[in-house]
Amino acid sequence: MVAATQSLQELCINSIRFLAIDAVEKANSGHPGLPMGAAPMAFVLWDRYMRYNPKNPTWLNRDRFVLSAGHGCMLQYALLHLTGYDSVPIEEIKQFRQWGSKTPGHPENHETPGIEVTTGPLGQGIANAVGLALAEAHLAAKFNKPDCKIVDHYTYAILGDGCNMEGISGEACSLAGHWGLGKLIALYDDNHISIDGSTDLAFTEDVGKRFEAYGWHVQHVEQGNDDLDAISKAIEAAKAVTDRPSLIKVTTIIGFGSPNKANSHDVHGSALGADEVKATRENLGWEYPEFEVPADALKHFRKAVERGAAYEQEWNELFAQYKSKYPEDAALLERMKSGKLPDGWEKALPTYTPEDKKNATRNHSGIVLNALAGVLPELIGGSADLAPSNKTLLKSSGDFQKDAYENRNLRFGVREHGMGAICNGIALHGSGLIPYGATFLVFTDYMRNAIRLSALSEAGVIWVMTHDSIALGEDGPTHQPVEHVASLRAIPNLAVFRPADGNETSGAYKVAVENRHSPTLLALSRQGLPNLTGSSIEGTEKGAYVLSDDGGTPDLILMGTGSETQLCVDAAVELRKEGKKVRVVSMPCWELFEAQDEAYKESVLPKAVKKRVSVEAGTTFGWSRYVGDEGVSIGVDRFGASAPLGALLEKFGFTVDNVVAKAKAVLA
Amino acid sequence: MVAATQSLQELCINSIRFLAIDAVEKANSGHPGLPMGAAPMAFVLWDRYMRYNPKNPTWLNRDRFVLSAGHGCMLQYALLHLTGYDSVPIEEIKQFRQWGSKTPGHPENHETPGIEVTTGPLGQGIANAVGLALAEAHLAAKFNKPDCKIVDHYTYAILGDGCNMEGISGEACSLAGHWGLGKLIALYDDNHISIDGSTDLAFTEDVGKRFEAYGWHVQHVEQGNDDLDAISKAIEAAKAVTDRPSLIKVTTIIGFGSPNKANSHDVHGSALGADEVKATRENLGWEYPEFEVPADALKHFRKAVERGAAYEQEWNELFAQYKSKYPEDAALLERMKSGKLPDGWEKALPTYTPEDKKNATRNHSGIVLNALAGVLPELIGGSADLAPSNKTLLKSSGDFQKDAYENRNLRFGVREHGMGAICNGIALHGSGLIPYGATFLVFTDYMRNAIRLSALSEAGVIWVMTHDSIALGEDGPTHQPVEHVASLRAIPNLAVFRPADGNETSGAYKVAVENRHSPTLLALSRQGLPNLTGSSIEGTEKGAYVLSDDGGTPDLILMGTGSETQLCVDAAVELRKEGKKVRVVSMPCWELFEAQDEAYKESVLPKAVKKRVSVEAGTTFGWSRYVGDEGVSIGVDRFGASAPLGALLEKFGFTVDNVVAKAKAVLA
């Protein structure tokens, strides 16, 4: 039954609107305004243009869709439900924002098949979309043949005013323009309303002109509420422009259809309320009870299932051809897609003995990355304009640039936050790429939400953070991380490594590469460090391990990470001269150590040994857990200072003498 | 002596260059490239336009100068030295980047009089400059009279490619354009080089067009290395445009004068090396030994002292007139400038009894802010588009907007990082303004470097962070802070409060307002909380205090913060029923508690009492310090989930029953 007054298209669009309205109303929580206003553009996109297979959300060549304005997630859940994704049956719509549902308050890719990336924190999604488009461009350049375009899809995003106000979107979109990512098409839901009220309050810039300055193709659909043809034409024009990303500004009314709340911030983040839901039903001529989708609309939407199966089938046939013509490439793509690492890849990891020369762990990292580049063609990444300092350039590859998408060195410019979200997008493209992003450790502050989202959304990104303590020297306190290692350890689902030498750097990378569904962060030294006796990849994989011991129950445990582990080793030598039984424990990764069984933990840090000293050139915050009631921590509980390395280590107490003195005080 | 081949201007400009070259060479560390390229624009600005008094760096009406590209700090130190600031004698130039010097590796306002803000992390400085210009605009609107413009100065900034790549600069500059801050003039050192190499690698957008999109007046000086008149004309044109901020793109050659390293990234961040220093001297016809400034150049520069004294004298006379005509305004401005708070201001802080109704601490915060607005005219601030949620609107004021600079409600839009740096700029304007900035606690991630810099640079900002735990409910894990309170506690010099009720919120604000040289962060609940028996402003000021006790040595200490303190109170009631002697300790601010003397700390948390339980709806990271070897912490060591408040508290164990159970286990 099609209501006499509604075309099939209107029926479909209103189906989206009322699923959103009803779900938010039932939860008495959520954001109805965006779905109500953006339903027309979303309908046109999902119905006429996007290629996806609801029955196989992980089909490699699907178009990617990102709702950067993640608070409008009911738009996305409605689309997933209507087009036939198994992850979102009507029961899940009814469970919107409830414990254990597949329809949480913002879209989460790890919870809901069909959701590509986790959004909500504004601006992240559009930056993820740049990463998805980058991944497509890279894989296309890498795998496609003149007669066989095996990777060929679009990345679409809907973003809002909030996304466009955030700096991260500017960073990522400037890069997208620089890279000329022509298959990235972003629809800007220009509804003029944010939480504080009209965008006149704080957002009066010319967004279109700004995107033109970034090198984007920019269009404007003035009647985004009803001019579906204009939306269609704009999408077609955007697809026709292949050398630049496209922004389509679609002017809409937030909460379209609500007679008393549309075009106001009241409709942004709260349920409409029973009266207004009723009034909206009347206003839009919607006769259906809550959560009921008219059969004609559902039937129309569900054509996506058949369409999607055909798309995938067509692609499968293409891939079969590809496989017969290019078996090696096909095998590589299949392996990457499976998430399986090549057999024996870890043999590329270098190991060291104490005779090997002193080196900074950032240099070890550079050596590892270059070694892995040879065995892991899926490795791709770069630095936020610190490649020479972060040691992240892959010598075997050129730069990923407009006419060289096959290359693996990404040049992010000074855009840490954009880099972070782009790396997340690359990881979540689901094609097996292993992205890494690098900057100075202190500038994790600029990209912290992207790091957090890599952990939350189970993105296997490798974060390469160099210059990991005051020991970076003269650049001074603005550049010296103090609280950063601790504050990163506090993030759930993130493995934070501070390796002590070459073997531990290799061990950290072994874990990082194997962590395909969680991120790993490496804190690496600027200064040279000796290769320690007893250090190993295997020990590093356990998070903490005994580096040296005198047998029996130790009098004292010295614990260190990274560049301070050597101080523990040297202090132990001194203390042993005085007859003390000393154990030295290297603790490169707390999270992994905590994941070991109790027996192992007890074997490394026996509860009975209460005399403990930790040494780490960062805040002591958090170390109480390991030094316990009778131990002490040597650290940096103030901001650093600008001075040469030697002066800093002396002034801040990172000397063997000070470790020995503190140890004796503990033993006394 | 003026070298035959050099005009006095060239001599002055080269004096800047060679102080930078020589200082970096002696330190064998630093960034010579920017000072060498930007010396001409800096000379023109400081010599012809800027109004400052080297002998009184805190003169209220001075023009402010910000080197946003802070790595080029030798430019600024050279200018301070040459123009006669006492803080930078030639000995300090020679001590560049050494322990204890006034010339650290990046500019630090708290170390070096004459430096306005701390820069180095890119983009922060230009955003600080927006804050400085905002402060000027606000004070001018507040204090100036038609016959007496007592506040009337410019804010100048030099920023580089790196600053322009960072999203934070886009956020702040979009706001500056929106606000029409016409007395903000930014010189963009367009030298085409960043650390990775040419900006062609990653930065090909049209920066000028982008700033036009923000509503800025944009000019281009093509020959920034030698066309001083063009620089002058551009500055004059910028000053003539009073309704918009100005960007002057000045195209320069990085490392100008170095025959072999100019225009390359080699000159960006390393000493030139002895040979190249020599070659540069020859190339620029510089016959002076290291650190020697030609007498004529020094004499010319030092005219700034006399000029500055005259500027200030003129202003003092104006202020004397102002004072006689407008004594109340003058008294207020003088009080504000002195940093002294009005007598009895703290009486405006509300207090509560347990009979007062339950309320969220974010609401208490809103009540306090509005109460303080009446007694503290220096209070100014707002939210990053969450005013209705953060409860930050001052009802007694309108919005700070283009034609209403006298108002105190700042509408930052969804721009947390820009907000942070703008607030820092307001605080560091040195005029006594007390800025506050607000968002959801989880989005401190977006502005963390600005929060860090408030702590490092001793800026008395109040950070108002609401929705402080999983208890925010349905918005889910993207919006639920878990690790944030811990990770903020790890930042040195930042007081982090998590108040439990109305009295503690008042106490937190008492500290925050009195902290005029360090920032304070408040983590506030979304949900309603009871007013607790025994809570007090005085207790809160000590960081932690005994809320209830049974006398004698307790069997158990229950410790809580914020919304979980009530659980400790209620659990104590249950445990006492079973004959346990229980102490309840409220710990709203760890940093303040640590600052108390040992006797007080022992009186609250006696070392002998080992049975301890902490309850906080965030990561347990860091709590070992207080619960010790035998205690346990109830917290959230995973990401949150989307569900209603009640379900979340139950599932995550924030119930009286669970606290009682854990306490019994500890006691067992």
Image (cartoon, coloured by chain):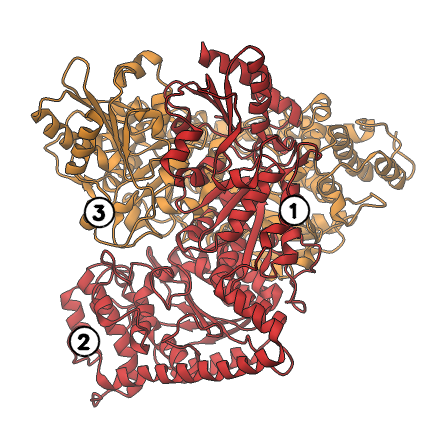
Chain colours: A red, B orange
Element assignment for label 2: helix
Task: Give me the disc on residue B326.
Answer: none
Q: CA distance from mark 2 to mark 1?
A: 61 Å
Would you say the residues marked 3 and 1 are in contact, meaning their CB atoms lie under 8 Å apart? no
* Residue A235 vertical placement versus A208 (above, below): below
Mark nearest the camera among 2 and 1 is 1
Under mark 3, the amino acid is Lys
Element assignment for label 1: helix
Q: Which residue is mark 2?
A: A281
Does any portion of residue B133 appear in the rendered image? no
Question: Which is more toward the observer, B120 or A612?
Answer: A612
* Residue A210 vertical placement versus B125 (above, below): below
Residue A546 lies left or right of residue B199; in this view the side is: left
Q: Residues within 10 Å of mark 3 (few under 14, many from 20)?
A: few
Would you say the residues marked 3 and 2 are in contact, meaning their CB atoms lie under 8 Å apart? no
Q: Residues within 10 Å of mark 1 (few under 14, many from 20)?
A: many
* Residue B235 vertical placement versus B655 (above, below): below
